[in-house]
Image: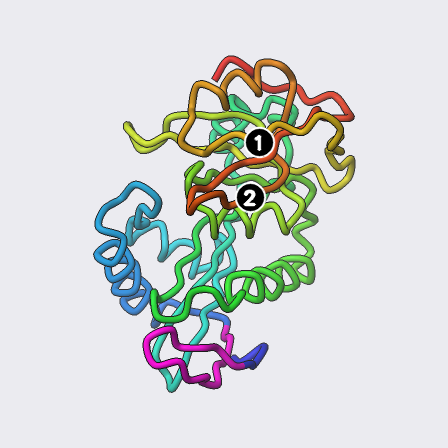
Amino acid sequence: MTIAMGRAKNLRDGQEYPYEIDILKTVDLDAIMALQYLIVRNNNGLETFIPMEKDDVRADLEGDGVVVGLKIAGELKGYFMIHYIRQSDEVIRFGKDIPSIEPNSGNVCRFRHVGIHPDFRGSSLAKEMSRQVMKIAGESGFGIRYMCTVVAPTNYPSLNHQFTNRMVAVSLKKYHEEYFRLVMFQDFTSPIGVSEQGTMDIPGSNLEAIRAAFREGHVGYGLRRTDGETHILFGRALNRIFMDQGA
């Protein structure tokens, strides 16, 4: 089912190609997995992009979330998925990083995963897919209040996308055993406001400075790119957030 159309520029040949955004189903599972591993090969490792397990992707395709895909000439060039957090243990797991999420909440959603073919990056495709997937989720009656996810602190495109969606970085945690990730969060009922007065500009690679900013009650709210390096902008939260500042 096609839900949106547009044009995307191919970075390899400089040409624009028409695309369609579709709601993906189980039949698209192998195409998603193949695209994930193509992205890993292009990134030369797992530092910023860790592929999802096949069973987890299948679960979201079968109703545990919403998955949309961007296709050009019938080939999958991008996908975006969100996950409905229905199980109490999963809510509690995120609640350890964001204690303001109520343990019995039934309206928590996670930006689960996004992948864009390397040839089509830089065309705001993730942003458009995000808009479509959130529209579908809103129409589903799930009633999203809390949105959360984790992002590598040096992953400029993913961070930019999250900040565009009004998410803020609230803590730094180790995920997948060895990789540090920023925990991103927003409460759409009582949004977290940020004071830009006294903004701190911290390189995404400086984990100690990021931890210190969280301990002092700051949250990440924006980005800069300086000499090719991702820098995160931190400001003081205007309303109280109950989170583990210790990271």
Q: Horizontal and vertical percent for residue 71?
A: 42, 77
**Quarter location, residue 138:** bottom right
Q: Secondary structure at mark 1?
A: strand
Q: Earlier in the sequence, mark 2 or mark 1?
A: 1
Can residue 106 be seen from the camera position used here?
A: no
Colouring scheme, one of rainbow, by chain, secondary structure, one colour: rainbow
Q: Are marks 2 and 1 in contact (CB under 8 Å)?
A: yes
Amino acid, disc 1: Asp
Residue 241 relative to residue 12: left or right: right
Q: Horizontal and vertical percent for residue 211?
A: 49, 19
Q: Residue 47's mark?
A: none
Identity of the residue drawn at 32% across and 49% down: 52
- Magenta stretch: give its range: 7-22
Q: Nearer the viewer, residue 64 or 16?
A: 16
Q: Horizontal and vertical percent for residue 113?
A: 43, 51
- In the image, is residue 93 part of the stretch drawn in magenta? no
Q: Secondary structure at mark 2?
A: strand
Q: CA distance from mark 2 to mark 1?
A: 8 Å
**Quarter location, residue 62:** bottom left
Identity of the residue drawn at 37% across and 67% down: 26
Residue 39 relative to residue 14: left or right: left
Q: Is residue 51 above or below residue 47?
A: below
Q: Where does label 2 land, which residue? A: 224
- In the image, is residue 13 part of the stretch drawn in magenta? yes
Q: Horizontal and vertical percent for residue 141?
A: 69, 56
User: Around disc 1, counting alpha carbons within 10 Å, would you say few (fewer than 14), some (14 to 19), or many (20 or more)?
Assistant: some
Can residue 57 be seen from the camera position used here?
A: yes
Q: Residue 201's mark?
A: 1
Identity of the residue drawn at 70% across and 24% down: 236
Identity of the residue drawn at 63% across and 42% down: 167
Q: Nearer the viewer, residue 182 or 91?
A: 182
Residue 14 relative to residue 235: left or right: left
